[in-house]
Image: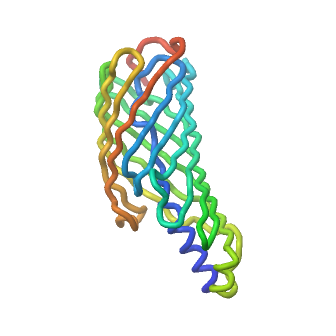
Amino acid sequence: MRAVALAAALAATAVPAVASAAPISGYQGEQENATHVNIGWNSAPALELAYGRTIPVERLVRRLDLELGLTLPVFLVTELDSFRLEPAARAMLLQHGGWGLAGRLGLPVHAGDNQTFQFASLGVHTGLAGGYFRRGGFVALEVEHTAILSTYIAASDRARATYEGIRDGFYAPTGGYLDASLAFGLSIGASLEVGLRAGYRSTHGLEPPPLVPFRAEVGLSYAFGTSAAAPPREIKQ
């Protein structure tokens, strides 16, 4: 039992190295392709690169944005080399005039290693952003939840020599995060958008995470390609 508890604790400490994030801007773009860059503090200094592809949808939403993002530490957290890869989908769910509610669903995969263990985890990252969205910019309150579904731990020879009985394998859910942030975006021309995000991160038990609980990011989005959807219109339910 001691070895199992140790491995679960290692899994819990591994995941904060690169926490789930999302592109700040891009809610109202019309081109079919978009690239996103975020940099800032998100549980740790991190850089996120993402590509998005817009698919026109005629019924429930006006358009669906499919994204693939890669997040890396700006500098390596002590002895930990890690990354996060997250496929996701985003859409404006409700819109009346300039007011709107956007939803996002992602499946983040975290992986990394240090001198004690290697790990890989799978999670679910959901989010809602409600606010005022116009072509020239937006302001929105974002609420996001990341749940870790399962983590695989492979102990090193050093760990096996130190902790008798430690086992490799999958371990049950090892936690997650709840984020509340305020985001701003400003369009520069037809293709470029700058975004800012600041907020607070806690665990699902509403306790601060092990590292600094505040997050602050700046993002840049560049859209290109032909128009993938009609100009923004009111979405009626």
Looking at the rendered image, the quarter that the N terminus falls into is: bottom right
Residue 51: which quarter of the image?
top right
For residue 97, say whether it is visible.
Answer: no
The residue located at (58%, 80%) in the rendering is: 5
In percent of width and height, residue 216 lies at 32, 47
The residue located at (63%, 86%) in the rendering is: 162
* Snapshot colouring: rainbow
Residue 26: which quarter of the image?
top left
Image height of 124 relative to 49, above or below: below
Which residue is at the front of the view, 3 or 41? 41
Which residue is at the front of the view, 182 or 156? 156
Image height of 176 relative to 191, above or below: below
Image height of 24 relative to 79, above or below: above
The residue located at (40%, 57%) in the rendering is: 43
Which residue is at the front of the view, 26 or 75? 75
In percent of width and height, residue 44 lies at 41, 56
Which residue is at the front of the view, 233 or 26? 26
- Is 36 on the left-hand or right-hand side of 8? left
Residue 222: which quarter of the image?
top left
The residue located at (43%, 25%) in the rendering is: 237
